[in-house]
Image: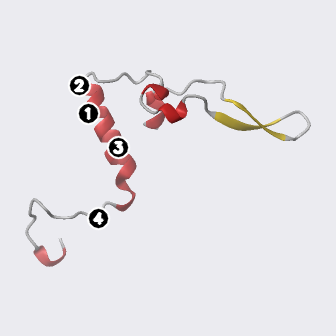
Amino acid sequence: MEGNKPIAPDTIYRIYSMTKVITCTAALMLYERGLFLLNDPLEEYLPEFKNPQVYRYNAYGALSVSPRRVRSGSRTCLR
């Protein structure tokens, strides 16, 4: 790397936009250990997703908010 500095246990890494990759890796490690299933309801782990609302246009072009029709599973987060 730049400067050829040795890596120590307290070395700080700049990961910037790697958070999704790290989160997916951690989730898949938990999956391999059998701690959750990919089809488990997302709200089981993240209660904020219990009653999701989505924006839709009706037949007249007016925007409205309504409940989401399809339930999100844990697999949705890994896409």
In whole angstroms, how far apart are the C-alphas of marks 2 and 4?
29 Å
10 Å crowding of disc 3: few (<14), some (14-19), many (20+): few
Residue at the disc numbered 1: 29
Q: Where in the figure is residue 16, as x and y percent of width and height?
A: 36, 61
Residue under numbered circle 4: 14
Report the Cα–Cα distance between label 3 and label 1: 10 Å
Amino acid type of the residue that numbered disc 4 sits on in the rendered structure:
Arg
Which mark sits nearer the N-terminus, 1 or 4? 4
Helix, strand or loop for disc 2: loop
> Which x, y percent locates residue 34?
27, 21
Q: Amino acid at mark 1?
A: Met
Residue underneath mark 3: 23
Is 53 placed left or right of 3 in the picture? right
Using the image as rendered, state which of residue 40 and residue 24 is in the foreground.
Answer: 40
Label 2 sits on residue: 33
Tell me which amino acid carries mark 2.
Answer: Arg
